[in-house]
């Protein structure tokens, strides 16, 4: 059975940092694309960043480029999201997701097979 568990969310002031973790079980990261999505109240789920488990290719949405960094540890079946220079508009529930999809489709939530339960990130101004 596949499980994805996010952790590391919390409350931080603008300009601060958080590191989210996504721990996976039941499948091998090497064969999957892992994405981080976020959803703020009243908004659609947004693709933030993704990483290919097979070759480490990454993608970042313009809104987080140069502030967020995704990384993976295939030995631990874990993916991390380092978030720096956080802004109030980064406030959302953050989800990690896994799927056997074409990497060029990695920002599309409907392409993913498995989802975590989400972790709240709140950035105060």
Image (cartoon, helix red, strand yellow):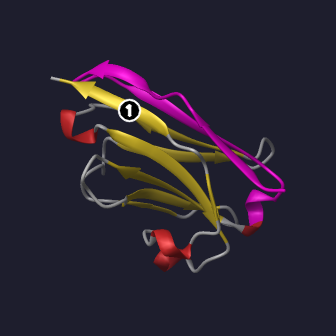
Residue 3 image offset from top left, x and y in percent: 74, 50
- Point out the stretch of residues depicted in magenta: 1-30
The answer to whether residue 81 shows anywhere in this view is yes
Q: Position of residue 6 (x, y in %)?
A: 59, 38
Magenta segment: does it hold 20? yes
Point 44% across, 44% down: residue = 94
Q: Which residue is mark 1?
A: 121
Kindly tell me whether residue 106 is visible in this rendering: no
**Residue 95 percent across, percent down from the top left:** 50, 48
Disc 1 element: strand
Question: How many residues crowd around disc 1 within 10 Å: few (fewer than 14), some, or many (20 or more)?
Answer: many
Q: Is residue 35 above or below residue 24?
A: below
Position in image of residue 85 (x %, y %): 27, 31
| In the foreground, 52 or 5 | 5
Determine whether, in the image, residue 70 is placed left or right of residue 83: right
Q: Which quadrant, please, contains the C terminus? A: top left
Residue with the most extreme left position: 125
Give the side of residue 23 with respect to residue 9, left or right: right
Q: Name the quadrant containing residue 29.
A: bottom right
Q: Residue at x 32, y 59 (%)?
A: 61
Q: Quadrant of the N terminus?
A: bottom right
- The residue closer to the viewer here, 89 or 84, is 89
The residue lying furthest to the front in this view is 42
Count of numbered circles in the view: 1
Instruction: Please determine whether, in this image, residue 117 is positioned above or below residue 122.
Output: below
Residue at the image position 43 percent from the left and 56 percent from the top: 49
Q: Is residue 86 magenta?
A: no
Give the vertical position of 116 relative to 17 (above or below).
below
């Amino acid at each position: 059975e596949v499980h994805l568990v996010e952790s590391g969310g919390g409350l931080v002031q603008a300009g601060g940092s958080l590191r989210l973790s996504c721990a996976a079980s039941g499948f091998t990261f090497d064969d999957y694309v892992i994405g981080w999505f976020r959803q703020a109240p009243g908004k659609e789920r947004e693709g933030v960043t993704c990483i290919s488990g097979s070759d480490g290719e990454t993608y970042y949405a313009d809104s987080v480029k140069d502030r967020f960094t995704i990384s993976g540890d295939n030995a631990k079946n874990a993916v991390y999201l380092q978030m720096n220079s956080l802004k109030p508009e980064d406030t959302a529930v953050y989800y990690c997701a896994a799927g056997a999809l074409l990497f060029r489709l990695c920002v599309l939530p409907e392409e993913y097979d498995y989802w975590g339960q989400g972790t709240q990130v709140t950035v105060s101004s």
